[in-house]
Structures are given as C-alpha cells and as structure tokens.
Image (tube, helix red, strand yellow):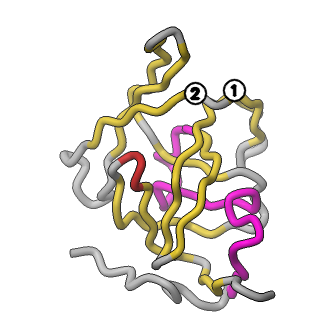
Amino acid sequence: MDNKIVIGSLEECSLPDLNIYNIEVRIDTGAKTSSLHVDNVVKKILNGKPWITFDIHPNAYDVSSVISCKAPLHDLRRIKSSNGQIEERFVIKTSFRIGSNEWEIEVTLSDRSDMNYLMLLGRQGMGQHVLVDPSQTFLVSSGDKN
C-alpha cells in the first residue's frame, strides 16, 4: 500500500496532454476501462499515422465552452457499456493528473451524454496508484466549479 493515494468516488482531474483541466471524474471500480465523453470524433491520418480529433465540453454546466483535441489512435476496442450494449470505441493514451499525482492512462472515447459525469476512471486507469474510499468525495481535489 506504499505510495498509493486515497481517492473518493468523485474527484477532479486534468488531462494535460489534451489541455483539459479540472473536470469531475467518476471513480468506478466496477468498470475495467476509463471513458471520456466527446463529440465530433473523426479518424484522420497525420504524417502517415492514425489520429483522432474530437471536441469536449469540459464544463457540463456551460456547453458553449468547447475544447478541440487531437491524439494518436492507440487502439480500437469492443467495450460493453453500462447498459449492456457492445460498441467499438477509439482508445487513446494520455496523461492523467489527480492532485499532485500524474500517470498515463488509456481512455475510450464515447458518448456519455446520458451520464452524469464527463469522465469515468476505471480499474485499468487506477492501476497501482490509488485506493478508493467509496464513502467519500473529493479527497484529493477540491471539487469546486469556479
């Protein structure tokens, strides 16, 4: 248990490689993969390699705010969603920051518009970095939406 941080069921995180900061993330130990709600996903070839471009509305309370992102395509996976449907999703790798801790995670890009949170952190993303206290929220981050 050395060097693990204790996080709650909700935290605030950043994805600095994508210029996304201070978004609320739902911590889900029942989910294998992490996912991020995105719009306008397009696969492109840049310098002979597959990339994904997409838009994110980082503030769920202000949908007029949009960040356009791009990342190398890491994988294409069949994922079983919470409603039991299997869908193919693009997977990217990106840095994940929570509090003062940062590591690389894989994230599937999906339509989470029917979910309460833009991002879900699954077990693979947690890796050996965290312990989860499901009875608490914002143990590492403030959770303030300024």
Describe residue 20's horizontal placement relative to residue 36 as left or right: left
**Residue 73 tag number:** 2
Query: Mark 1 and mark 2: span between their CA atoms?
Result: 8 Å
Q: What residue type is labelled 2?
A: Leu
Q: Is residue 146 left or right of residue 131?
A: left
Residue 66 percent location from the top left of the image = 25, 43
- Of circles 1 and 2, the one toward us is 2
Q: Which residue is drawn at 51% across and 49% down?
A: 114
Identity of the residue drawn at 45% across and 12% down: 47
Residue at numbered disc 1: 76
Q: Position of residue 13 (x, y in %)?
A: 45, 67
83 up-or-down from 9: above or below: above
Assign the C terminus to one quadrant of the image.
bottom left
Quarter-wise, where is residue 49 in the image? top right
Which amino acid, mark 1? Leu
Query: In the structure shown, which secondary structural element does the residue marked by tag 2 occupy?
Result: loop
Residue at 59 percent of width and 61 percent of height = 103
All told, the count of numbered labels is 2
Mark 1 near mark 2, Cβ–Cβ under 8 Å? yes
Q: Looking at the picture, does residue 40 appear above or below residue 130?
A: above
Quarter occupied by the N terminus: bottom right
In the image, residue 143 lies at what x, y percent? 38, 80
In the image, residue 30 above or below residue 86: below
Q: Give the range drawn in magenta.
A: 109-133
Q: Position of residue 7 (x, y in %)?
A: 61, 82
